[in-house]
Image: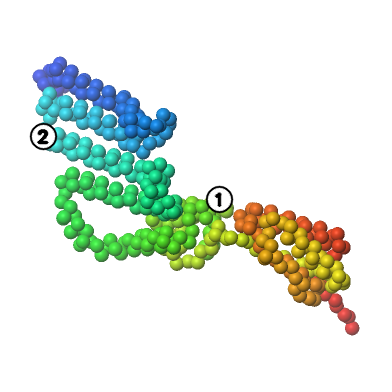
């Protein structure tokens, strides 16, 4: 009970109505900035993007959330600064508040700038078109990721400087531990250089259909460490860039034409006149098809086997997409079967004649 009375007496002695009103004003300052931060961020972005009237587009702007965070931190900072004299705040508290506020501004600024460095940003695409319009999206995306990484590193060094650490001493410390860091980062360095090799040689880009070892699918993204491929089973596999740089890669998307090969084994009893007629009709049918490249058509009496007469049908089509290729192949097969039916030509079966002595 005595301790409770001491607390009550301390409050009566030290807490006055003036101090209570000052604390109330400080809280009010914070609440005002908290309430209006969205509106202020919206107005600032609206000022610099005069052509934009879409609220959703403005709220998705890379600077929108960092500005909201800035105004919230500003509200807290101003509230503490307002209470400096009424509460006789310690110099250390003011010093720490200033440090935290400056570090917050550095982090928010770095986040805003880094978020704006994306391939979807109109300004970045404008810069790309001005510098080199032939730069592929995957290469440009990789460059932007590297720049974002540099921005965060610079922001980290600025924060360390704000905390009062000597960067010279930090660099010296890193020099002492460089051997350990190098050993630990060997795989990362391999993947990084592998990614650079991929972008320089350009064996594939985002969106290509590739095949490597036991993986086959569409490239979704290329990062510093790995390449993300979505397989035809709809699963996602991340392949290290160091592996891709040292493996043979089949890029099916780079095909200019696709081969369709069919071996027709006609019955041995088929008259040669029929064989020749079937051969000519199949060739004429292939010439009439728009998607077949005419100078690649081969329809030849290829071989005589134990089972029958082999007729080789080989063509190239410009339907390189797998789905359209299968559709074209199916139509050709239907046409061939129709020709064989009309000419009363039978396909041979795998047969054997056994003589019993």
In this view, 138 is above or below 244: above
Q: Which of 94 and 61 is in front in this view?
A: 61
Residue 191 appearing in the image? no
Q: Quadrant of the N terminus?
A: top left
Dot 1 falls on a residue whose secondary structure is loop
Q: Residue furthest bottom?
A: 357
Q: Decide if residue 321 is on the left or right side of residue 301.
A: left
Q: Residue 263's mark?
A: none
Q: How far apart are marks 2 and 1 (CA)?
A: 60 Å
Q: Residue 234's mark?
A: 1
Q: Residue 91's mark?
A: 2
Q: Which residue lies furthest to the top in this view?
A: 17
Residue 249: x and y in percent read 51, 64
Tag count: 2
Dot 2 falls on a residue whose secondary structure is helix
Mark closest to the chain's N terminus, 2 or 1: 2
Residue in view at x 20 percent, y 28 percent: 78
Residue 179: x and y in percent read 25, 65
Residue in view at x 22 percent, y 58 percent: 174
- For label 1, the crowd category at 10 Å Cα-Cα, with few meaning under 14, some 14 to 19 and many 20 or more, is few
In this view, 214 is above or below 166: below
Residue 36: x and y in percent read 31, 25
Residue 69: x and y in percent read 30, 34
Q: In which quarter of the image is residue 125?
A: top left
Q: Quadrant of the C terminus?
A: bottom right
Residue in view at x 78 percent, y 76 percent: 304
Residue in view at x 37 percent, y 59 percent: 192
């Amino acid at each position: 009970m005595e301790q409770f009375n001491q607390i009550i007496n301390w409050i009566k002695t030290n807490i006055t109505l003036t101090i209570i009103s000052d604390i109330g004003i400080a809280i009010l300052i914070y609440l005002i900035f908290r309430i209006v931060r969205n509106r202020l961020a919206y107005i600032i972005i609206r000022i610099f993007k005069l052509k934009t009237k879409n609220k959703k587009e403005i709220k998705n702007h890379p600077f929108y959330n960092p500005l909201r965070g800035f105004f919230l931190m500003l509200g807290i900072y101003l509230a503490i600064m307002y209470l400096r004299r009424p509460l006789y705040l310690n110099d250390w508290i003011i010093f720490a508040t200033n440090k935290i506020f400056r570090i917050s501004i550095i982090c928010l600024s770095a986040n805003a700038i880094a978020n704006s460095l994306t391939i979807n940003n109109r300004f970045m695409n404008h810069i790309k078109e001005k510098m080199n319009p032939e730069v592929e999206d995957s290469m440009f995306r990789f460059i932007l990721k590297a720049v974002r990484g540099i921005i965060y590193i610079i922001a980290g060094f600025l924060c360390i400087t704000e905390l009062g650490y000597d960067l010279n001493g930090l660099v010296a410390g890193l020099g002492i531990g460089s051997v350990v860091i190098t050993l630990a980062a060997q795989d990362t360095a391999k993947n990084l250089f592998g990614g650079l090799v991929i972008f320089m040689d350009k064996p594939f880009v985002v969106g290509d259909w590739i095949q490597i070892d036991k993986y086959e699918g569409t490239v979704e993204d290329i990062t510093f460490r790995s390449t993300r491929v979505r397989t035809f089973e709809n699963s996602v596999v991340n392949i290290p860039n160091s592996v891709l740089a040292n493996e043979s890669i089949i890029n099916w998307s780079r095909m200019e034409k696709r081969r369709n090969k069919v071996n027709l084994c006609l019955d041995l009893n088929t008259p040669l006149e029929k064989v020749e007629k079937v051969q000519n009709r199949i060739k004429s049918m292939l010439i009439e098809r728009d998607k077949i490249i005419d100078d690649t058509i081969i329809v030849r009496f290829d071989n005589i086997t134990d089972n029958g007469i082999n007729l080789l049908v080989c063509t190239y089509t410009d339907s390189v997409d797998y789905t359209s290729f299968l559709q074209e192949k199916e139509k050709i097969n239907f046409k061939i079967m129709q020709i064989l039916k009309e000419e009363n030509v039978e396909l041979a079966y795998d047969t054997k004649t056994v003589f019993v002595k």
